[in-house]
Structure formats: C-alpha cells, structure tokens
Amino acid sequence: MLSPCLRRAAPLLAFCSLAFAQTEDDPVVVTASRTEQRIRDAIAHTTVITRKDIQDSQAVDLPTILRREAGVELSQDGGLGATASLFMRGSRSAQTLVLIDGVRVENAASATTAIQHLMLDDIERIEVVRGNVSSLYGSGAMGGVVQVFTRRGSGTPAPYGEVTAGSRDTYKVLAGYGGEFGDTRFNVSALRLDTRGFSAIDPRFAPVNPDDDGYRNESITASIAQRLGRNHELGARFLRTRTKTDYDDPFAAPTSLQTADQDLGMAQLYWDARFVERWKSRITASEGTDYRTDFLDGGFFSSSNTRNRQLMWNNDMTLAPAHVLSLAAEWLEQVLDSSFAGRQKRHVDSIRLGYLGRIGAHSLQVNLRNDRYSDFGDADTYFAGYGFDLTDAWRLTASTSTAFRAPTFSDLFGFPPFSFANPALRAETSRTYELGVQWASAGHRVRVVAFQTEYKDEIAFDFVTLQSQNLAKAKVDGVETSYGGRLAGIDLTAAFTVQDVVEQQQGGPELPGLRRAKVFGSVTAFRSFSNWRLGAELLSSGERPDVDVVTGQRLSNPNPGYTVLNLLAKYQYNKNLFFAGRLENALDEDYQLSSGFKTAGRGLFLTAGWQP
C-alpha cells in the first residue's frame, strides 16, 4: 500500500546514500517519550531545532522555521501575523498538538494554536515529533507534536538584544537579560515587532480593501529556577504575547477594515524532586490562554476567549540501568467564552503509564493512556515501539499506535449563523504503523520512515450542511526523511516527504486532502569563513488541492507548486557584536499557501545584535 510513495521516494533514497558521510550532535530530547533520552535512541521520528539553528535562519516567527521540517506543511492567510495552519504527516491542522513548555495554549473552539504569534526570539529550542503520540499527550496528537521551549538563563548574567529593520516598513527590537547567580537561574526578555505588511487577498479572487494589512507583536518572556540542594528545584515560566493584526475578509464590503486583537499567555509553576535516587518526580501547575477580539470598521464584531488549566504529576522510576517506568496523572480544564457559541466548559482526567528500556541491541517503548472527558466519555490509546541496533551506526525501528481527538466546541455547537451545531459528532480515532531506518555516526544522522495512518470518524466541515461531519474515510501513507550533518565544511540539513492523503465524505468520492502536497522538501546550507557565516535555504512543494476563498467549494485546479530561496549572511564584528542580513524569497517567487491569499515577495531584512 506504500508503493506509490516508495516510487516517488527514489530521489530521497539516492540523497540518503550521499548523506552517509556526515556527523551531527546527539542532543537529549524529552518530547518523544516524556522521558529524557538521546535523540538517536528515540523510536518516534524526532528532530530538534536548536537556538543556533534559529539564529542562523534569522527567521522571525515559528511558522517560518517549521516549513523546513520533514513531514511538516503550513498554510497562511497572508503575511506576518495572519492565521497559520500546521499540517503534520498529512493530518489536518486540528490533529497536531503544539505545546509551550508542555502547556496547551490552544483555542478550544478550533483545537489549533496561534503559532503565527510565537516569535523565535522567545524560543530556546523546538522538538518536533511525528506520528501518533496521543498515548503521551492525549487529544489532538494524531499527526504529531511540536513542543516549544522558552529561553533559559545560563552562565554569567549578561544582557542581549537585537534591532532589525527591513522591507514593508518592518522593524523589531529585542532586549533581554539572563544567567545564573549561584543556585538561581533566570532569564527575562521583551520584544516589539511592527510591519506594514501587504494586502492579504489577491483581488483576482475576491473584491476586498486593497490597503496594506499590518501587524504588531509585543511579547514578554521570563523564567526563574531555584535549586534547593542536590535533589530539588522550584521554577516558574511565563510568556505573554499581545498582537494587533489587520486582515482581509472576503465576505466583507470592499471598503471595510478588519482587525483582530489577540493575547496569548502561558504561566507555569513546577517542582522537580528526587525523593530517592531511583525516583524522579515533577509536579506542574499551568495555565494557557488565547483571547481574541475581532473588529469591523472599528466596532466590535466577535470574541473568542479560551483558558486551559492543567495539573500534572509525572514520576519516572529507574527499575534497573536502562529501564525506566513512568506513571503520571493529569487534569485539564478547558473553558471557552465566545460571542457566537456562548460559554462552554469541559474537564479531562488522565492517567498515563509508560516504559522505556534497553537490553543490548534491543530497545522498547510502551505507553498506555486513558482520558476521561466530562462531555463524551473515555478514550484509551497506546504506543508500542521497537528499535534494533544492527551496528553502532545503523538502527531499525518499528511501531504501532492509536490516537484520538475530541470534537471541539465549534464542532459540537457551531457558530450561528455561519455554522450550526452537530451534537451527534463522534470523536476521531486513528491507528498508525511505522517502519524506519537510521544511520548515525560521529554526530551525523539521517533517518527514513515509512508510515501509514487510517482515521475513523475524522471530523471535517461540510459547506453544504454548514456543519462539522464525521467522514466516511480518511487515510495517509507516506515516506519522510530528515538529515543533518557537515560535508566539506558546510553545515547541512535536509528534509524530503512523499505522501498520499485521501479523504471521503459520507456518500462522496475519495478526494486528495486539502492544502497537503504529495511531495515537498527543503535543504539548508551554512558555512563559516573567518568572521562571516553565509547560508541559504531552499523550500519546495508540489501542487496542493484547495477551496475557493469565497464559496468554500473545492477548486478544479490545485494551487501550483513552488520553490522559494532565502539567502543569509552574518558578520561577527567581535565576541559580542554582530551584523546580519536575510534576503527572503530571493527569486521573488509568486505563490500561495492558501488559495486566494498572497505571500510575501522579495524582502531584505538587516539586523544588528549583541549577545553574551
């Protein structure tokens, strides 16, 4: 059943044969198993975007840097700050979970996170895990998990900052201070970004106001951790992002002005404890919020406010060297206050059991989870994965897993008069099978994974009934690869994905999944010359089916494929001061990520920065 994808993967396999001369670091990750492990030992396909990767890219926001990841696609309704949707392994945007330091900051109406407002200056690292991991994270983790870790302090306390200016009257100012005083580690930063932007909707698709759609983002992050002896640590983390976005609405009058004020927040308190040598415990209390208010011609139009409160108690017990048993209890309360759907509330009680172990060349990961929802009952999920080391460099992996997604409040109750309630909706479930091969040596790694996911009762909006409906069929199969290493002094990363996404409404034909390509990939290359670091990013995608921006009906012709080139340069003037430049969309490619919506043309952005 994977044969069509395997045929398309021939260039990928040829690429991999060239990649086997590389090396790469072997960082510790936590998202793939919720237990610390080396990335080369993770059974789920996992990659890490480090702080150095973020600095090299000179990208501003989270969607920009995620586009170069294997298995990851994005659509966006315009420029900076416009609504972005994340697709992993051919799943829908509501089927991928985004966490900030382990905290859900999702909109309870749509089950998506406003990733377009997460600025990379606030982020220390990003872990991307592909595939069903509901047995670790609960509802929504069907296509995978993206976990963002905010910046931490380290070393001698010192200030840092950047000033950026560029095309479309864009400017950004960042200031921060962080480090360690004895047993105290801290970091605090503040950022403001403004851009004039461009008119989001192409007038060939809908008659809208041709004015530029600007964007403003003001963010504050802070963290503090206090070690209490050898076995305990108390800490707190905080993020607050306030934004103002101008946007185009194809249903409004051609002279109308639409704006949205959005406020994302994350606050977390935690206690890490090691009561005995073999028992590590973490208790976390957190809250994630997403408050949005929309305005039409300066007057109130709508509001949607979500609060996610979480309590978690995670315990890792070392049974023997290389054998860890995990037991966790979680509680989640979601509250939505919407001008359309009114006030809705649910709570979820969860229990999770996990095992991670190794015997010689064999490794095993097993996770079991039960989620009990106040509004639709129980859901049980599992993950069973096996890894076998053929040699020190070669490794085979296999896994099977199940996942689920609870209907959102908008799925169940609609947004009259734009959509209507369907209280009979069933929760989505899925089952995934994976086979993978990895080569890692002297710090270099390439991984190829074949996967197949079958969904049952997948939820999609029906533009005929104006309701969310359970589909008759949904299925994805594909092959993805990721690579990182150094060749002839050049730091290289690459990703390539081929996939078939099929969906079928009740009584309808099988159709390709919307806004998901059959083939896409990326290559990034950087090289240092004395005080200079030069780089390039190449992003490419095949054609993608889409719907009309006004009617919502499927287009007869898909969005064409595209290839985008970004050029980057950085000059390190001394150990602290640097200057950098990013030529974005260097070839001025005219393309769309969402039908009817423009993307940014060629733009130049210059930065001066100070770093410890």
Image (cartoon, helix red, strand yellow):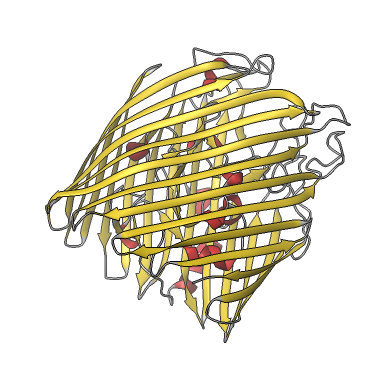
Please, is residue 102 above or below residue 38 in the view?
Answer: above
State the image quarter where residue 396 is shown.
bottom left
**Farthest-out residue, bottom:** 530
- Which residue is at the front of the view, 2 or 204? 204
Q: Quadrant of residue 40?
A: bottom left
Q: Residue 522 vs residue 397: left or right?
A: right
Quick check: can you spot residue 65?
Answer: yes
Q: Which residue is depicted at the point 49% across and 44% down?
A: 477
Does 206 appear above or below 214? above
Q: Nearer the viewer, residue 481 or 236?
A: 236
Residue at image location 28% in from the left, 61% down from the top: 183
Count of marks overlaid on the render: 0
Q: Position of residue 548 (x, y in %)?
A: 75, 33
Residue 249 position by quadrant: top right
Q: Is residue 28 left or right of residue 87?
A: left
Which residue is most to the front? 181
Is 443 positioned to the left or the right of 566 in the image?
A: left
Position above or below: 19 against 402: below
Q: Is residue 73 visible?
A: no
Q: Position of residue 523 (x, y in %)?
A: 58, 65
Horizontal and vertical percent for residue 294?
A: 69, 29
Residue 10 drawn at (x, y percent): 53, 61
Viewer-nearest residue: 309 or 278: 309
Residue drawn at 18 percent across, 54 percent down: 231
Q: Is residue 381 left or right of residue 237?
A: left
